[in-house]
Amino acid sequence: MDQESPGSKKYNILKSLLKQQQKNTIMVNKDKESYHEHLTPIQVKVLATKSNCEKELKSWELDYIKTHNLISPTHDIMISDKIPPVLLNKIKYARGLLKEWKISFL
């Protein structure tokens, strides 16, 4: 005669649902921690790549100015050369990723 009352049944159901929800919350938190552990090194690499590309582009611009009688390169000139378009694309995508991750430097 172990019949449960309707209130007792409901209590047991809610209790088991709460336990399951707590387990799910723990798993979500572990997944977020794992995600951030893997994301951080990628963010550092993207930031370093952006910085290096900006330095290389600046160096290319200075070399161009020195070899072309102090004339600054236009956007068309940069695109027609082999090196700047690659650097410009890397910088553009790195900025996009950093903006998405809400990482900015003044």
Image: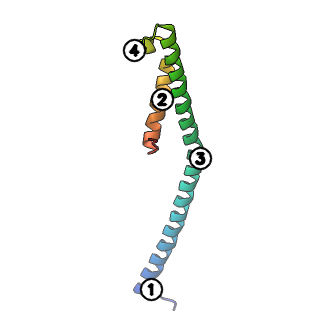
Mark 3 to mark 1: distance in Å? 45 Å
- For label 4, the SS is loop
Q: How many other residues sit within 10 Å of disc 4, few (<14), some (14-19) or many (≥20)?
A: few
Residue where numbered disc 4 is placed: 74
Q: Nearer the viewer, residue 20 or 58?
A: 58
Could you say whether the residue bearing mark 2 is in a helix, strand or loop? Answer: helix
Task: State the CA–CA distance, disc 4 to disc 2.
Answer: 17 Å
Task: Assess disc 2: are there few (<14), some (14-19) or many (≥20) residues with their C-alpha within 10 Å of its C-alpha.
Answer: many
Q: Label 3: which residue?
A: 38
SS under mark 1:
helix
Callout 3, which amino acid? Answer: His
Q: Residues within 10 Å of mark 3 (few under 14, many from 20)?
A: few
Q: Which residue is mark 1?
A: 8
Q: Earlier in the sequence, mark 1 or mark 2?
A: 1
| Amino acid beneath label 2 | Ile
User: For the residue marked with disc 4, what is the amino acid?
Assistant: Thr
